[in-house]
Amino acid sequence: MNAVPELLVHPDAGQLARDTAARVLSTLAVAQEQHGRAALTLTAGSIMESIWHELAEAPGGGPVDWSRVDVFWGDERFVPADSADRNDGPANKILFDHEPFSHAQRFPMPASDGIFGDDLDAAVADYTAQLRHARRPDDSNSQGIPSFDVVLLGVGPDGHCASLFPEHSGVFDESGPVIGIRNSPKPPPTRLSLSFDGIAVAREIWFVASGAGKADAVAMAWSGADRVQVPSAGPRGQVRTLWLVDQDAAAELA
């Protein structure tokens, strides 16, 4: 529990994306052997899109039965479903709109033009209910949601992860595994996010960071900063916590 973080530095962003995609495939395949279904949680960003492109190139979808993969989201912008600001749009375009990845069971976070309209609290309650309904028989944690096999988290230049921003309301919110974010310091202002508690149920948490613009945030998080000031310093996987970075993002590490 609360695995001590491990650091793997890759020579460049391309190698980082390739190695991370290969690691995703092997982790999901093992999860299917152990639990029947695999639970994958995604977040967005340029390096994540590179990883999705690498996954899309895997012959036959790799060693994974994608019909037995549940895909969740670590955060989402609360905007209309067809908005270019949605996180899940690029993931679908690159990966999940195509065979065999389209067979995955997708759990998108609600959109602001869905059945709840702009009621953020109702959207939070709905996604929480979806997660609880999606539990596998052997999932057991204090939040009553799937024990995600892996959560992929990006790192913002300010140290944020998911939609948990430094000293913003989300880093203090312990109301449940899914929380609403209002007045986000990064637009759009209204979002849904897994809370720290929601992320912490994961067996493995991987932070993926690329580029010199992330170097300060990576160094602060790796050095053990307080999660209120540097949210990426907070999450720890139950089994493993990995920092997967390229050399540019690792430039400020001691």
Image (tube, rainbow, N blue to C red):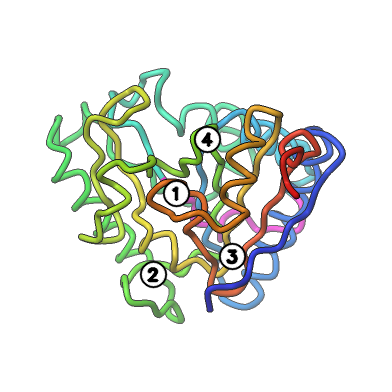
Q: Give the mark, 4 or 3, whose residue is nearer the N terminus.
A: 4
Left or right of 124 on screen, residue 75:
right
Q: For mark 1, give the secondary structure.
A: helix
- The foreground one among 108 and 65 is 108
Residue segment shown in magenta: 62-74
Q: Give the mark, 4 or 1, whose residue is nearer the N terminus.
A: 4
Identify residue type, mark 3.
Glu
Q: Give the mark, 3 or 2, whose residue is nearer the N terminus.
A: 2
Judging by the rendered image, the residue that carries numbered circle 3 is: 204
Judging by the rendered image, the residue that carries numbered circle 1 is: 231
- The foreground one among 227 and 110 is 227
> Which residue is farthest right?
11
Does the magenta-highlighted stretch encompass residue 162? Answer: no
Bin the neighbour count of mark 2 within 10 Å (Cα to Cα): few under 14, some 14-19, many 20 and up.
some
Please provide percent x and percent y for residue 191. Answer: 29, 35
Identify residue type, mark 2.
Arg
Nearest to the eye among marks 2 and 4: give it.
4
